[in-house]
Amino acid sequence: MSLLEPSSRSLNGPSIRRSTKPPIYTLVGVLILVALLTAAPWIFPAEWSAVLLNFFILVIMATMWNLLAGYAGMISIGQQAFIGLGAYATLFFALKGMNPFFTIPLSTVVCALIAVPVTFLLFRLRGGYFAVATWVVSDTAMLVILTVAYLGGGTGKAMPGLQGLSPSETAHDAYLATWFVALIVVVCTYLLLRSRLGLVLASIRDNEVAARSAGVNVQSARRLIFVIAAAGCGAAGAVLAISQPFVQASNVFNLQWAAEMLFVSMIGGLGTIEGPIIGSIIYFTLQQFLQQYGVWYLIIFGSLAVVVALWQPKGIWGAFRERFHSELLPVGYWVRESKTKE
Amino acid sequence: MSDALLEVKELSVYHGQLRAIDDVSLSLREGEILAMIGANGAGKSTLLRTIAGLHKPSSGAVLFDGKDIAKLTPNRRVALGISLVPEGRRLFASMTLEENLQVGAYRANKGSFSIKRVYELFDWMPSRRKQSTWQLSGGEQQAVAIGRALVANPKVLLLDELSLGLAPIVIERIYALVPEIVAHGVSILLVEQDVAQGVAVADRVHCLLEGRTSLVGTPADLTSDQIDHAYFGADISHSNATGDVAE
Amino acid sequence: MIWLNIVIQGALVGGFYALFACGLSLMFGVLKVINLAHGDMAVVAGYVAVFLAPHLHIPGLWSFVIVVPIFALVGYVLQRTLIQKSIDRDPFTTLLVTFGLSVVIENLLLEIYSANGQTVNIGALITKSWHPASIIYVSYVSLGVLAVAVAVLGVLQLFLSKTGTGRLIRAVADDREAAQLSGANYRHIFGIAAAIAFATVALAGIAYGMMTQFAPTSGGINLLFAFEAVVIGGIGSLWGTLVGGIALGVAQQFGAHINPQYQVLAGNVLFLLVLAVRPQGLFGKKTALS
């Protein structure tokens, strides 16, 4: 299953290459896409921007969930804890007088800081018990926030600092903020997975015992990924809070975010960068079409996720990748045998 | 061999990507004791486990009483009369000695072995039957594991590495029971790393090297030199294997 | 007196939690599966009781007579099909599949029955209670549920320790492969364990429906409580689950006493505390731990 250019002809031993160089058409395509999406509020109708904004939020969350589950092997149904905390951190700083947009990096850091001690509790459990424990953490975070009247308690609070701008300006700014956060998250994830840490993660995922005996500090790697995923979800929560000018606990801490992240990643393809993006596209398309039928889109999507888990666990992108042997955003390595034979 | 009770024909089994068993054939006659010997990783346990139904062969067949049993799940094979005493004993840790035997007896075939009979065979058991398995020594656990397989009244008893982790005198005591088990009409296919023990108790010996048959014969016919060579891999005395290099 | 009441009320609700949790505990102990749809199954049982029982002219209190066997069958079938398939893949898959099922079930219920609260109608019994002392009221229904919980746990314990099938279940839980080699059809055993788990879940769901109102999303919070009860009591111990449930109940009542908003939070805090200080729970074996 080797792919590209045979430049290792003269080597004696096996050579190690990146899976493929991101094909040139990917790079060009990405650049065009980036330009289009940045200009979106001005060239597309306003409703499209709103949909794209929510799409970006989902992409951020799904990419983070995929990082946790597909690469670090931790299934979490409690990431909404950090979405909520990110949203409320933004609210908090905005209430203190900061420009909401500037709070985004701050909220991200806050979530990362909170995630660290949480890992010490959560990492005592494994598998399904870990998963439900993440949910308990999320539930607890929500309950604690609900007791804080300053942040709006049960009824919620409007995001201050946005009233000065016109609605369309706010929408534009919110859109751009979300788009850039999404771009940064995906690019950083891509770079991370191409880095040494990415290789470490793949080794843990494939064979933990072997990784440990090769000297990999499994616990630290997992902790780092959990914190990164928390930060990413915190960023998602921050932009979520800005885009929906009313922050309410039951919304930002809702288990539905977990369901969406999970389904999207599963269907799109676990363990790939493209997977969450593709899954999000499908999800949103489905949602748009089935909007008037209440929650049927969720039922369908959930059933689809179950089917995918049982019969095609690699998801859509995984299946495509296997069949056509190509990748848009490669993060792996290939070891190619030397061309010289005895 | 038309009167073979258990037959393995040109069996190949993969362990992931490794070919653990490579084109192995053997047969076990009624009332016979066949010892499979070979080094660690030679494929002996894999062979037993495949016969018991825990592994699927990639090619070849396992025949019992002349019939292909490929489609049968492990528990169906027990009902047919094939019982495996697995490597490492694998007793039920949360249960007592007696409960372990009771599990073995639950779907038992008709035959001479009952729990009572096992208690007669191992006379130390009745007084300790309410004890948990972790309170038993290695040799005692091995006895319970054998008893658990026996109460199902198998026609073929597969014994995987009985001597593992046991003191020599304990091993001797356990192997002393083997002829008595056979006397009750059970045929035995056993796997042993301890060559001397295997050869001492067996009617016939079958040596595996890296998944392939390297030597077959009766203890009387085979010299210890031949066995050594077959075990370690230099200079093979029988068909298939070509000059493979050992460690 | 107030503290006594807290303990009593906590124990009463704890009994319910234990009933809810024992199915979860069994599924994990035997099948090594965490059924994230566990809570939702209980809610479905409640809906079946509310909407099916009247058709068969069965009074609310006796609806369990038909619902429990139905659920036992559903559990067996579900295990032999979907759950077995996901077990054959890996533990990852079982989590994803049961989570997916959970979302699908909740939203289906929402579509079919709307978000309105439902109760299992037991007439005037809901209001009756025993009044032993000044502020202590012990509702008959809660007491009944606690009694049922203890009875179910007791019967289950006896079944597992004294019967042949129970022994097989324990054998499969200890060492699935060795059990196969001893002649057990482990898939069938899994099915039986799942059937038992679903039967208890049905009981718990109906009990819940008698005690309070339920809605399509009620499953989630109860799964959380069941899970907390199991972890606090100790993974792998049935009686531990009872103790864990009671501990959880008492903690929640205590929290509610300080401030009604703190009720669920207090339970969560106890759970996190146990996780921090004694992760294997009060009576647990260290199987689910890292």
Image: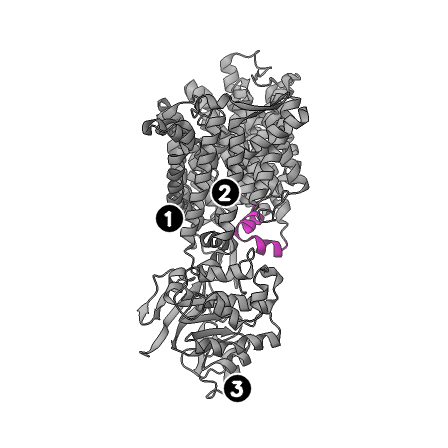
> Is residue A285 at least partly visible in the picture?
no
Q: Are marks 2 and 3 on the same chain?
A: no
Give the residue drawn at x 61%, y 54%: A212
Q: Could you tell me the amino acid type at mark 3? A: Asp
The dominant secondary structure in magenta is helix
Q: Nearer the viewer, residue A326 or C227?
A: C227
Indicate the secondary structure of the residue bearing disc 2: loop
Residue identified by numbered label 2: C34
Indicate the secondary structure of the residue bearing disc 3: helix
The span from disc 2 to disc 3 (Cα, nearest Å) is 56 Å
Q: Characterize the local packing of mark 1: few (<14), some (14-19) or many (20 or more) Cα atoms within 10 angstroms.
A: few
The magenta-colored residue range is: A198-215
Q: Could you tell me the amino acid type at mark 1? A: Arg
**Mark 1 and mark 3 in contact (Cβ < 8 Å)?**
no
The disc at residue A203 is none
Q: Nearer the viewer, residue B172 or C165?
A: C165
Q: Characterize the local packing of mark 3: few (<14), some (14-19) or many (20 or more) Cα atoms within 10 angstroms.
A: few
Give the residue drawn at x 64%, y 54%: A215
Residue identified by numbered label 3: B225
Relative to residue C48, is residue A331 depicted above or below? below
Q: Position of residue C139 (x, y in %)?
A: 54, 25
The span from disc 1 to disc 2 (Cα, nearest Å) is 33 Å
